[in-house]
Amino acid sequence: MSDSLSVVVPCFNEEAVLPVTHERLRASLDAIGMLWEIVYVDDGSRDRTREFLLALAAADDRVKVIAFSRNFGHQIAVTAGLNHACGAAVVIIDADLQDPPEMISSMVEKWREGYDVAYGLRTERAGESPFKRWTAQVFYRLINRLSDVSIPLDVGDFRLLSRRAVDAFNSMPECDRFIRGMVAWVGFRQIAVPYARDKRYAGESKYPLRKMIRFALDGIISFSDAPARLATTVGFVSLAIAALVSLQVFVAYFFAHDTVPGWTSTFLAITFLGGVQSLCIGILGEYIARIYREVKRRPLYLVAITANLPEPIEPRARGAARPDGLPGRALSETRS
Ligand code: UDP
Ligand code: MG
């Protein structure tokens, strides 16, 4: 369907908000006037979320439900929704009404203008503690420094993706999924749609500090090799220090004669070997960073447009359908 819209809603213990969320979503989608479906993903809720969603689905076949066997986390829930969404454009929205469903129509407008990604940019963040805002700022500054893809500040997962952006996202089979980074990596034409972020409608945040730290680490480690390379820098610095110190040690031993027997060799061995060891760990880090990049099996590139070629050549995931008949992994395998 060329004019259909899917909405993906991850839900974890959201029984308190879902009735209102569904009503507001339905009203906003009806107002847009496209064919629509809502894909609710129940991320292993322990309350009555699943029963509520299944009842919605029974009453309206435009409501699709995926219920996980246990809690797999927000980013995995959104991934499952994107894997199953069929629309020509797909919107990701939180269940707690912090992202106003009424904004979806502005995103659809951008999509009609030809944008592939319209992401919500938070101009206000009501009901979020200064601590949460501060950590977010530090985090985005850090990740943009360490990584080649630039991930905009004050942007969450509330966004619209065009079909080709969703397909590109689905062709990234990595396990640790930092969705806002992955969508930034996809490229194509992206634009911000400013909106004021509301307070959570009911219930409490499902992101305690522990999950937030895990999320931040996933982001940095999935989008930057810098941590694996740290040892190289440390190794070079300590070798440089060892070289300087050894000068002083030689002067002390040969000219000043003020050393205790055994000190010179011990001291040199410690500084030099320390440097060599860090450097060797750094070299391992460089290889591990490369292995890590290989095992993520992202497509090498994505094509936006071609000229004078029969049809756009889709990049195959490395390892896709091997000519020798050995098991390989085709791009489409990630979409099932
Ligand atoms: N969520 C989820 N699985 C989790 C945690 C959260 O599916 O393990 C969902 C949650 O139901 C909500 C969205 O992810 O729809 C964002 O979570 P929340 O609003 O609690 O995070 P916050 O807005 O406080 O960062
Ligand atoms: Mg929230």
Image (cartoon, helix red, strand yellow):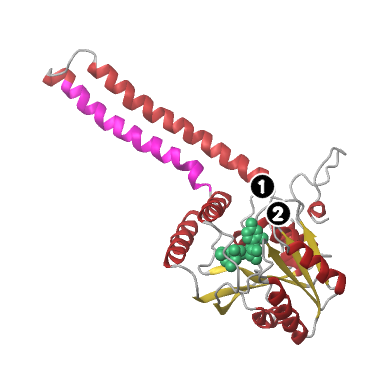
Disc 1 within 8 angstroms of ligand 1 (CB)? no
Q: Is residue 284 left or right of residue 23?
A: left
Q: Residue at x 51, y 42 (%)?
A: 228
Q: Residue at x 61, y 42 (%)?
A: 292
Label of residue 296 in the image? 1
Q: Is residue 54 left or right of residue 131?
A: right
The residue stretch that appears in magenta? 225-252
Q: Is residue 287 above or below residue 163?
A: above
Quadrant of the snapshot with the C terminus? bottom right
Q: Secondary structure at mark 2?
A: loop
Q: Is residue 328 above or below residue 93?
A: above
The amino acid at mark 1 is Lys
Q: Is residue 252 left or right of residue 283?
A: left
The amino acid at mark 2 is Met
The chief SS type of the magenta part is helix
Q: Secondary structure at mark 1?
A: helix
Label of residue 172 in the image? 2
